[in-house]
Amino acid sequence: MRTVIAFVSVLAVATPAQAVPPRPDLMTPVTAVAARSDRRPVAGGVHDAAVGRTFISWAGQYEDNYVQSYEHRTGTWSDPVRVAGGDNDSHNYPTMIQAADGHLLVFRGLHNRELWVARSPRPHSIEGTWTDVNIAEGLGATYPMPFRTADGTIFVFFRETAGDFDPAFPTDTRPMKYVRSTDDGRTWQSSTTLTGDRWAIAPLNRPDNMNEIYLGQLRYEPATLLHRERVGIVYTLAGGGPEGHLHDRYHRNIYYTAFDPGSLTFRSAAGRSLGTSIDDADQEAHLKVVETPLQTVNPRSPDYINLVGTTLGVAPFVVWMQLDAAGVVHTHTGTWAGLGGWRTREVATGVRVRDMEPAGPASWRIYATPADGTPGIGVYRLTAGSFWRYETTIATPKPVQRIEVIDGRRDPAWILATGASSARDVAVADGDIYVAGRPRP
């Protein structure tokens, strides 16, 4: 592994949102409704070109799941539609995709227990009474991350707390698995049934007790002349560390893998096939981007949110955040350099990266929020997975907690930003919902 000397861009600190006039196409579909959410930057909304509508999902009071529709022709938003209850847990956020038959599907995991899917009654619409079904094959689900492949197959990755179902496993054994549907979400098969493996990503029995997986993001990539259809995945480990078996006491390391939905196999950045499941030996030998130390101050570093993409559609890269002893957020990138392995560098301080999208063959647009919790969304350009510069700021009236780039986005509904609640308690729901158009540097 090669590490490039870290350097901090002088443009890395977000320009204060107060100095930037509000952008005219910032929309606020609804105010003072969002509760705290732990949603990762996956599947927040989708544009339906067939009917000229954009659909978004968000978590309201008690983490209840809501959806809204934007009509591009008239420039109007629907009222929020409650599609399911959230069971009073910030982990039970909604994630939304659209099935090939046009129906909208909203997934939630009842923390460590069950996976549920709410289905719209009609295609291309949120109107009417949604069905809400427990996916039995998703037993133990937390953090559902769905995607749809080119042929319409739907996958949902999620994490299982193994000790809740088998007392032989300690509390910090929390591996990943998935379910798959080939009929637009009506019936499901588990990864265990499909492959025979109990789990898909499972670093068991580590001597440092870091046996939990936190997927920061997964990103579906359609097939090209250069590669097969695949899903890039970035994750970090958690667990009790030297203190024994404790849940989420420490975080450690960044890993990258690519999932092939056709063969149900995982690969390294170098293209090495790891079969249908990943164990600790696999990830340490072939998937590690960077090794980070266990920290007694700010021990949950790297952060829960990490980003994944590719440069020129070929070389994968990841973005992650680490906290120092003073609580300062440092943003790092890791870029695959072939025989040179992973090249890592620090590119920014003082911002929390939230999501990103391609901005050119070799560049990506990063959306971030100020680390001090002030309002605004900083927009940055990352080129070749390494070079970072500030582009603009999207001013928001109040602070933002989560951002998702909308799938199939169309102006003026380009990104979804969930406003920060004033409390960690999901009974408090006073954050705004924002939707902004395409950034214009």
Image: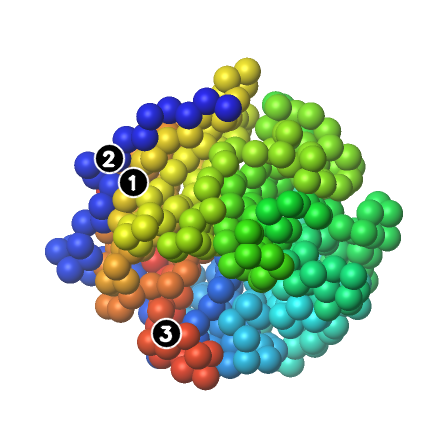
Q: Residue at x 69, y 34 (%)?
A: 282
Q: Amino acid at mark 1?
A: Ala
- Crowd band around label 1 with a 10 angstrom C-alpha radius: few (<14), some (14–19), many (20+): many
Residue placed furthest toward the front: 243
Residue placed furthest toward the left: 19
Q: Residue at x 20, y 60 (%)?
A: 22
Labels 3 & 2 near each other (Cβ < 8 A): no
Q: Amino acid at mark 3?
A: Ser
- Does 409 appear above or below 75? above
Q: What secondary structure is found at the residue carrying circle 1?
A: strand
Corner quadrant of residue 244: bottom right
- Does 62 appear above or below 224? below
Q: Quadrant of the C terminus?
A: top left
Rendered location of residue 229, percent (x, y)? 66, 35
* Residue with the mark numbered 1: 348
* Residue with the mark numbered 3: 421
Q: What secondary structure is found at the residue carrying circle 2?
A: loop
Q: Residue at x 64, y 45 (%)?
A: 207
Q: Earlier in the sequence, mark 2 or mark 1?
A: 2
Q: What secondary structure is found at the residue carrying circle 3?
A: loop
Depth check, front residue: 441 or 163: 163
Tell how many labels: 3
* Residue with the mark numbered 2: 9
Rendered location of residue 274, percent (x, y)? 73, 32
| Left or right of 45, for residue 33 | left
Residue placed furthest toward the top: 339
Rendered location of residue 379, percent (x, y)? 30, 46
